[in-house]
Image (spheres, rainbow, N blue to C red):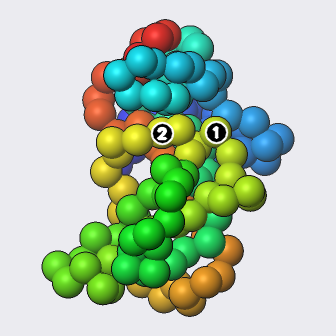
């Protein structure tokens, strides 16, 4: 059963998605972590943040790829079967989001365009500057 507050958040996220909008986030430079995404205002828990877009590929195919715009989205016990999304030139600010836990469904075709939804997961809102 979803609470009234969570239902309002879900409906708000659906409306933002239909308009092609999302919560207010900015890309900032950090001397320790390089570029990262930061909240530009409060974001409620269980809020859709952004889609990470790109093409999926096996990690082993990108081992010598000199770029940091890839996200591991399926880490298998055997490295050859682990998958990444490579944002390349078709990515968005989601390429600067790092250190998240992500989940995916089976049935992806290797090399096809791929989208991964990134949402908040904890039970606390994200505050500005987080």
Position in image of residue 105 (x %, y %): 42, 76
For label 2, count other residues whose C-alpha is less than 10 Å away and answer few (under 14), some (14-19) or many (20+).
some
- For the point 53% across and 38% down, the residue is 96
* Residue assigned mark 1: 93
Q: Is residue 106 left or right of residue 19?
A: left
Q: CA distance from mark 1 to mark 2?
A: 8 Å
Q: Tell me whether circle 1 and circle 2 mark residues in contact (CB < 8 Å).
A: yes
Q: Is residue 40 left or right of residue 34?
A: right
For numbered disc 2, what is the local secondary structure?
loop
Given residues 98 and 9, the one toward you in this image is 98
- For the point 38% across and 28% down, the residue is 33
- For the point 54% across and 75% down, the residue is 56
Given residues 57 and 19, the one toward you in this image is 57
Q: Quadrant of residue 8?
A: top right
Q: Is residue 33 above or below residue 20?
A: above
Position in image of residue 67 (x %, y %): 53, 54
Given residues 55 and 33, the one toward you in this image is 33
Q: Split into 4 quadrants, where in the image is the C terminus?
A: top left
Q: Residue furthest left?
A: 77
Q: Is residue 119 left or right of residue 23?
A: left
Position in image of residue 44 (x %, y %): 46, 24
Q: Residue furthest right?
A: 19
Q: Which mark is residue 113?
A: none
- For the point 79% across and 43% down, the residue is 20
* Residue assigned mark 2: 97
Position in image of residue 106 (x %, y %): 42, 83
Given residues 18 and 31, the one toward you in this image is 31
Q: Is residue 95 left or right of residue 91?
A: left
Can residue 29 be seen in this snapshot?
yes
Q: Is residue 4 above or below residue 10?
A: above
For numbered disc 1, what is the local secondary structure?
helix
């Amino acid at each position: 059963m979803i609470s009234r507050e969570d239902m309002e958040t879900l409906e708000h996220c659906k409306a933002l998605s239909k308009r092609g909008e999302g919560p207010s986030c900015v890309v900032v430079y950090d001397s320790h972590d390089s570029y990262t995404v930061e909240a530009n205002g409060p974001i409620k828990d269980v809020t859709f943040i952004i889609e990470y877009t790109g093409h999926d590929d096996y990690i082993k195919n990108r081992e010598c790829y000199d770029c940091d715009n890839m996200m591991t989205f399926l880490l298998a016990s055997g490295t050859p079967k682990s998958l990444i999304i490579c944002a390349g030139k078709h990515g968005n600010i989601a390429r600067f989001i790092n250190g998240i836990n992500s989940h995916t469904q089976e049935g992806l075709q290797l090399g096809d365009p791929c989208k991964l939804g990134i949402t908040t997961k904890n039970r606390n809102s994200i505050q500005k500057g987080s």
